[in-house]
Image (cartoon, rainbow, N blue to C red):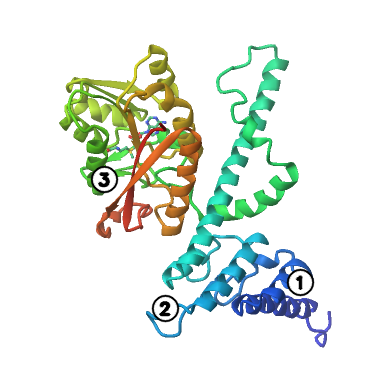
């Protein structure tokens, strides 16, 4: 290249930038016809629905929503603008726009809609999030199933006995996703999953249950941290634990099963309710040692089951033990683990007549829209598994100093939604 020749890429880059700006402009003007043309056919960009403005980080979804913001703070959004905004948002979502991409202000399109009071647009994005997450969860199951089948083939080839437990149980609903659909959905959903942290019911992305159970714990007066300084359990959750225990175990003489002892907060409140039987499943050796040090093994009605619930619960079902109340609050488990818990195990353990169960509802709690999406995802999966759920809102006090020394503030939303689940009538 000589000095006179400009770098070729510059001209190409200018074209690309112009294309990006044209799409973002059409989105912000809610110019439906032009936007559709640009994202569907005319643009040379491979993923036109997800282009980004380099300065603001706005995607077309952000642009369409931001354009609804009234000029005067606190003013109502003009209904016509809201209507055309909703059309633009629907179009973009249909064309594969990622519902939870972040702009340079760390806001997803849904966060932006919520901030400017565009509730209708917020709900559209929440619904898109629910669809994407449901599909992603199904595809995870699909991948697991393929792996299981491969393993099963390996086992059969080696002449060993195939493990019968749980085999093929997720297959019927999964075959409805064709390979072509799966590929399209997967590429969008995988990008989306990066922003929505669904790695644990307690929401600690990147920590696996096996790694956690292997790590040394730092058990303090007001919190438990794992060896990466992730908050395993914290004192500020006490009010939530108390309300959960009382809702699940309203009177003395009932049988309760708690999965995950942690700091023993919920178990302490269960004890106050005077249970006839109080079973606790705990997998971490440090927590078990601490429990014994504090005399939990000799408290009234208490039986400690040392190990992972995945290994313990089938034995309890085998013995025919049932409970009036079950509580689930583990750490570093995936949503798939949780779904497996309630769709495969609760049915054999919960009293058919009036039994209630609950869980620590911390999924996606580091962002309101993620919390709302995961409430709906869980509700749909619970329904599919045969449970009704009532939610009670509990205000969470402002948490600031609590996060000192903790790797990540896993709770940001204002209200905790306490779930109370029962078998459907
Ligand atoms: C968030 S803490 C529970 C806090 C408890 N609700 C309380 O009130 O203090 C999670 C607990 O689940 C335990 N745990 C994690 N994975 C588990 C598993 N697969 N089976 C049983 N316990 C598990 C952890 O060791 C930890 O003690």
Residue at 68%, 35% in the rendered image:
175
Residue 291 versus residue 68 in the image, above or below:
above
Residue at 56%, 23% in the rendered image:
166
Residue at 43%, 51% in the rendered image:
364
Q: CA distance from mark 1 to mark 2?
A: 35 Å
Q: Which mark is residue 76?
A: 2
User: For the view shown, which residue lies furthest in the bottom direction?
Assistant: 4
> Quick check: can you spot residue 108?
no
Number of marks in the image?
3
Q: CA distance from mark 1 to mark 3?
A: 51 Å
- Comparing 103 with 231, the one in front is 103
> Quick check: can you spot residue 86?
yes
- Residue under numbered circle 3: 240
- Comparing 408 with 23, the one in front is 23
Q: Quadrant of residue 30?
A: bottom right
Q: Could you classify mark 2 by the number of other residues whose Cα lies within 10 Å: few (under 14), some (14-19), or many (20 or more)?
A: some
Q: Which mark is residue 43?
A: 1
State the SS at label 3.
helix
| Left-right relation of 400 to 123 | left
**Of tags 3 and 2, which is closer to the observer?**
2
| Left-right relation of 227 to 397 | right
Q: CA distance from mark 3 to mark 2?
A: 36 Å
Q: Earlier in the sequence, mark 1 or mark 2?
A: 1
Q: Position of residue 230 (x, y in %)?
A: 37, 47
Q: Earlier in the sequence, mark 3 or mark 2?
A: 2
Q: Ligand 1: give its quadrant.
A: top left
Residue 169 versus residue 129 in the image, above or below:
above
Q: Earlier in the sequence, mark 1 or mark 3?
A: 1
- Comparing 17 with 182, the one in front is 182
């Amino acid at each position: 290249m000589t000095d006179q020749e400009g770098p070729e890429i510059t001209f190409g880059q200018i074209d690309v930038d112009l294309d990006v700006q044209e799409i973002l402009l059409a989105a912000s003007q809610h110019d439906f016809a032009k936007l559709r043309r640009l994202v569907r056919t005319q643009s040379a960009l491979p993923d036109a629905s997800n282009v980004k403005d380099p300065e603001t980080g706005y995607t077309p979804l952000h642009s369409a929503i931001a354009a609804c913001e009234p000029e005067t703070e606190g003013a109502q959004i003009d209904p016509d603008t809201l209507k055309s905004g909703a059309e633009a948002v629907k179009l973009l979502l249909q064309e594969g726009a990622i519902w939870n991409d972040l702009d340079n202000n760390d806001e997803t399109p849904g966060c932006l809609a919520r901030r400017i009071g565009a509730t209708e647009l917020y709900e559209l994005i929440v619904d898109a999030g629910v669809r994407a997450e449901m599909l992603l969860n199904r595809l995870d199951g699909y991948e697991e199933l393929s792996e299981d089948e491969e393993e099963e083939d390996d086992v059969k080839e080696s002449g060993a006995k195939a493990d019968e437990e749980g085999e093929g149980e997720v297959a019927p609903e999964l075959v409805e996703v064709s390979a072509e659909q799966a590929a399209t959905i997967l590429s969008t959903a995988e990008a989306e999953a990066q922003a929505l942290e669904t790695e644990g019911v307690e929401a600690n992305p990147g920590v696996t249950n096996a790694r956690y159970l292997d790590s040394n714990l730092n058990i303090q007066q007001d919190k438990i941290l794992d060896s990466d300084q992730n908050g395993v359990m914290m004192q500020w959750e006490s009010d939530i634990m108390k309300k959960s225990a009382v809702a699940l175990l309203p009177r003395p003489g009932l049988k309760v099963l708690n999965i995950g002892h942690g700091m023993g907060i919920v178990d302490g409140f269960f004890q106050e309710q005077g249970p006839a039987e109080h079973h606790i499943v705990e997998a971490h050796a440090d927590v078990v040692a601490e429990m014994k040090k504090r005399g939990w093994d000799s408290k009234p009605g208490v039986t400690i089951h040392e190990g992972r619930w995945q290994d313990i619960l089938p034995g309890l079902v085998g013995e025919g033990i049932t409970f009036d109340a079950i509580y689930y609050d583990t750490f570093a488990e995936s949503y798939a683990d949780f779904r497996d818990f309630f769709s495969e195990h609760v049915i054999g353990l919960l009293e058919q007549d009036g039994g209630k169960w609950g869980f620590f509802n911390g999924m996606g709690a580091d962002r309101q829209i993620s919390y709302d999406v995961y409430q709906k995802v869980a509700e749909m999966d619970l329904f599919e598994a045969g449970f009704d759920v009532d939610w009670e809102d509990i205000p969470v006090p402002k948490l600031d100093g609590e996060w000192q020394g903790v790797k990540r503030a896993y709770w940001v939303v204002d209200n905790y939604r306490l779930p109370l689940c029962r078998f459907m009538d």
